[in-house]
Image: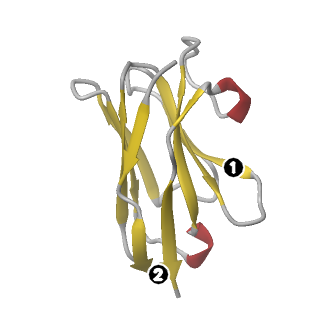
Amino acid sequence: QVQLVESGGGLVQAGGSLRLSCAASGRTSMGWFRQAPGKERDFVAAISRTGFITYYADSVKGRFTISRDNAKNTAYLQMNSLKPEDTAVYYCAADSALRELSIRLENYDSWGQGTQVTVSS
């Protein structure tokens, strides 16, 4: 398994921006998920091991950007034009099974500790 350490959450007003970081102990395809109170953990974005392939949930497409710096084994989630409905705990995840990219929660076998993102209206 891969060790993951997240950072970058916080409180921001609607329309603002935040960048989340996820430092990993190895290079795998990676994803971001989020979980709002009382709701299931949902897919947000994913990126392949090389960084050449990305995929987004429709709800964040055009506002969020996933990227990675393989020299630092770190993935990022740049979140712009934030909305109150983006409020959730955000988790980064790693898929060590050498899949190109996955949007399925069950394919990820390592998880970060989670970071709170709160967007006020």
Q: How dense is the environment of label 1, judged by Cα within 10 Å: few (below 14), some, or many (20 and up)?
A: some
Query: How many numbered marks does the figure carry?
Result: 2
Q: Going from the N terminus, do you reach mark 1 or mark 2 first? A: 2
Q: Quadrant of residue 11?
A: bottom left
Instruction: Return the residue at label 1.
Output: 42
Q: Vertical placement of 7 versus 104: above or below?
A: below
Task: Looking at the picture, tell me which residue is in the foreground, 50 or 24.
Answer: 24
Q: How is the image coloured?
A: secondary structure
Instruction: Return the residue at label 2.
Output: 14
Which percent across, then down, holds residue 49? 42, 20
Residue sitting at 30 percent across and 27 percent down? 73
Residue sitting at 57 percent across and 69 percent down? 87
Q: Vertical placement of 51 versus 45: above or below?
A: above
Residue 24 seen in the current view: yes
Left or right of 56? Residue 36 is: right
Q: Amino acid at mark 1?
A: Asp
In the rendering, which numbered label is found on residue 109? Answer: none
